[in-house]
Image: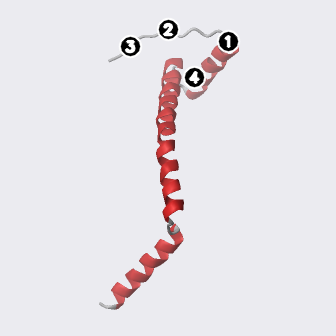
Amino acid sequence: MSRRMTVVFHDDDLYTDLKVEAVRRRLTASEIISEAVTEWLESREDASLLPVIESARAEYKAKGGRSWNEVHQEVKRSIVKRNGKR
């Protein structure tokens, strides 16, 4: 579904920059604005995950954990051990 919206630019330079970029990228100004709004919304979604990430980090610090390198080495040793038994 296509919807229309009017965007008023109060900054002539911003509007000119948008039009130049649209020509340079062979897109319409509308496509660039749509892309920018999509990226902005996705960044807001990512920002909402920050508390979850911080909570996981805090839990990792509180309970202790192992580095990826340590886990990776353990996996490699297990693979070698398993393959050696064949």
- Quadrant of the frame with the C terminus: bottom left
Marks 3 and 4, how far apart at CA: 20 Å
Q: Nearer the viewer, mark 4 or mark 1?
A: 1
Q: Secondary structure at mark 4?
A: helix
* Residue at mark 3: 3
- Amino acid found under the numbered disc labelled 1: Asp
Quarter residue 3 falls in: top left
User: Outermost residue, left direction?
Assistant: 86
Marks 1 and 2, how far apart at CA: 15 Å
Q: Earlier in the sequence, mark 2 or mark 4?
A: 2
Q: Position of residue 48 (x, y in %)?
A: 48, 37
Relative side of 73 to 15, left or right: left
Q: Earlier in the sequence, mark 3 or mark 4?
A: 3
Marks 2 and 3, how far apart at CA: 10 Å
| 10 Å crowding of disc 4: few (<14), some (14-19), many (20+) | some
Q: Secondary structure at mark 2?
A: loop
**Which dot marks residue 11?**
1
Q: Earlier in the sequence, mark 3 or mark 1?
A: 3
Q: Nearer the viewer, mark 3 or mark 4?
A: 3
Q: Secondary structure at mark 1?
A: loop
Nearer-the-camera pick, 63 or 8: 63
* Residue at mark 2: 6
Q: Secondary structure at mark 3?
A: loop
* Residue at mark 4: 22
Q: Position of residue 52 (x, y in %)?
A: 46, 46
Marks 3 and 1, how far apart at CA: 24 Å
Can you say whether 46 is above or below 29 in the image? below
Q: Earlier in the sequence, mark 1 or mark 2?
A: 2
Nearer-the-camera pick, 47 or 64: 64
- Amino acid found under the numbered disc labelled 2: Thr
Q: Residue at x 61, y 17 (%)?
A: 19
Marks 4 and 1, how far apart at CA: 17 Å
